[in-house]
Amino acid sequence: MKQLIVIFIISIASYIQAQNEPKISEQIRSMSRGNVSAFVMELPGKVTAIKSVRKEWLDFVKSYKGKTSYNKKIDEVFTDNAFVKGMSENTVDISAKVVSKDEGTLELVVWYNLGVSYLSSQEHAAGVPVAAEMLKEFSKRVYANLLEEQLDAEQKALKLMNSGLKSIQKEATGFDKSIKNYGEQIKEIETKIVAVKEKEAINTEEQAKQKAIIDTQDKKIEDMKREIDSMKSRKRK
């Protein structure tokens, strides 16, 4: 588990570093009012992150003073009469949606309705850098959220590591106690061994003494037998 967390953190960090400058392109994309010019920005994230990115966009676009709402049926965020400085002298209607491009990449698709037509490099070249800068500014929020998620993951990983360390330290304390107990047992056994060896030495001496007594008794018996045999022989004569 720990290894998976570390791999996830490294992957996200590498992706974020590679995405310092978000990829933004101008494309014709389908929306509720047809196929029109849009600005598409790639962002790191899985399909499960679409909701959180959309929520972030809803909060971000509030600063442009328009009236913003999300239409679930068409999956579009619409901001009516937004003030986008440098893009148009009039208010701008902004439509946006977040979609999944592939397993690890999301796309923020944004359409800028200038009234007569939608923002494009062919008809409104001066407004294109403004749109790009707006999207880049939003990307900073997304990357900041990713970094916060990364930080949270790192903190959780650190917590797991500290927990693992405590477990190892607790185990080590148990080893120390076991070693101490075994050491005391060894000393006790060694004392018993010394005592047994002393008894063994005494026993060996006692065996020698007893064997000497037995040998003396055996000799005495043999002498008596020979004496008896001698006396019997004299009687028969």
Image (spheres, rainbow, N blue to C red):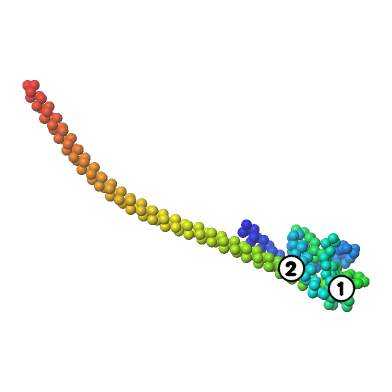
Seen at 68% across and 62% down, the residue is 11
Seen at 82% across and 74% down, the residue is 64
Residue 119 appears in the picture as rendered: no
Q: Give yes or no for contact between labels 2 and 1 (Cβ–Cβ under 8 Å).
A: no
- Residue that numbered label 2 is attached to: 142
Q: Is residue 127 above or below residue 215?
A: below
Q: Quadrant of residue 97?
A: bottom right
The residue lying toward the viewer, choosing from 224 and 14, is: 224
Seen at 60% across and 63% down, the residue is 159
* Mark 2–mark 1 distance (CA, rounded to whole Å): 25 Å
- Residue that numbered label 1 is attached to: 81
Please name the amino acid that badge 2 sits on.
Answer: Val
Neighbour tally class for label 1: few under 14, some 14-19, many 20 plus, Cα within 10 Å: some
Please name the amino acid that badge 1 sits on.
Answer: Asn
SS type, badge 2: helix
Is residue 107 found left or right of 159 in the rendered image?
right
**Where's residue 78, x and y in %?**
84, 68
Instruction: Assign the C terminus to one quadrant of the image.
Output: top left
